[in-house]
Amino acid sequence: MSVFQTYLQLGFFHIFNLQAYDHLVFLLALCAPYAAAEWRRVVALVTSFTIGHSITLALATLGFVQYNARLIEILIPLTILLTSLLNLRQAGQDTRRQPLLWALPNLLAAVFGLIHGLGFSSYLRELLGQSSRPLAELLAFNIGVELGQLLIVALILSVGFVVLRAARVARRDWILVVSGAAGGIAVILLLQNLTT
């Protein structure tokens, strides 16, 4: 297997993995307010997150940005909590009225992506060791992360579709339950990171 394929798989399995459940929970909170029919909004939202985390993943992996890993581990659950709180505040509102690209959730996703990118880079830098300019590995890892994210988002939207359509759960209830659960997990993560 080539180095590119290896890092592609490492990126995919890093995000699509229960050990990276903080990122999974963030994606759950990010997608909770949207139905499958709003897939364009979800693509814009996830693309905003991707832009943010791709920037800091590259800068940190290539050594242009230094950061405190412990602080990032505290900030990641905060991004989940803030996203969940925004969802709870806006539950029941019509998200179709928001602009497709220049909406508050997209801006927050991009900013929060900057934080998550630093979290991804910690893992990638451990894998790379002393490699000084790992451009191919960085690109492959980032593509792998994106493929994992797309699969997770597709699963979230599919489950939401089944719950909202087949089980006839009210959309507001779905948003409240999913965002409340994500926010609860974020609080637990935050407390764990603050006490260790």
Image (tube, rainbow, N blue to C red):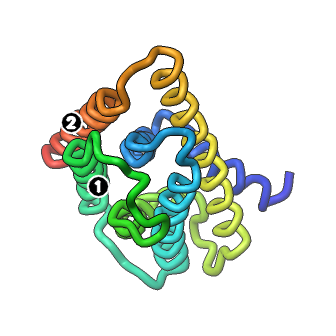
> Up-down: is 109 above or below 88?
below
**Residue at the limit of the structure toward the bottom, as seen here:** 64
Q: CA distance from mark 2 to mark 1?
A: 13 Å
On the image, the x and y values in percent for residue 126 come to 52, 59
Residue at image x 44%, y 43%?
Answer: 34
> Up-down: is 158 above or below 57?
above
Q: Amino acid at mark 1?
A: Thr
Q: Is residue 75 visible?
A: yes
On the image, the x and y values in percent for residue 144 come to 66, 54
| Residue at which label 2 appears | 188
On the image, the x and y values in percent for residue 180 come to 24, 33
Residue at image x 47%, y 62%?
Answer: 49
**Residue at the limit of the structure toward the right, as seen here:** 1
Residue at image x 54%, y 22%?
Answer: 162
Q: Is residue 159 left or right of residue 176?
A: right
Front-lying residue, 173 or 188: 173
Front-lying residue, 128 or 61: 61
Q: Is residue 65 left or right of residue 51?
A: left
Q: Which mark is residue 79?
A: 1
Q: Which mark is residue 137?
A: none
| Quadrant in the picture for residue 168 | top left
| Quadrant in the picture for residue 99 | bottom left
Residue at image x 45%, y 41%?
Answer: 24
Front-lying residue, 125 or 46: 46
On the image, the x and y values in percent for residue 109 come to 39, 62
Q: Is residue 125 visible?
A: no
Q: Amino acid at mark 2?
A: Ile
What kind of element bears circle 2?
helix
What kind of element bears circle 1?
helix
Instruction: Determine whether label 2 and label 1 are within 8 Å by CB.
Output: no
Counting residues from the start of the chain, the first of labels 2 and 1 encountered is 1
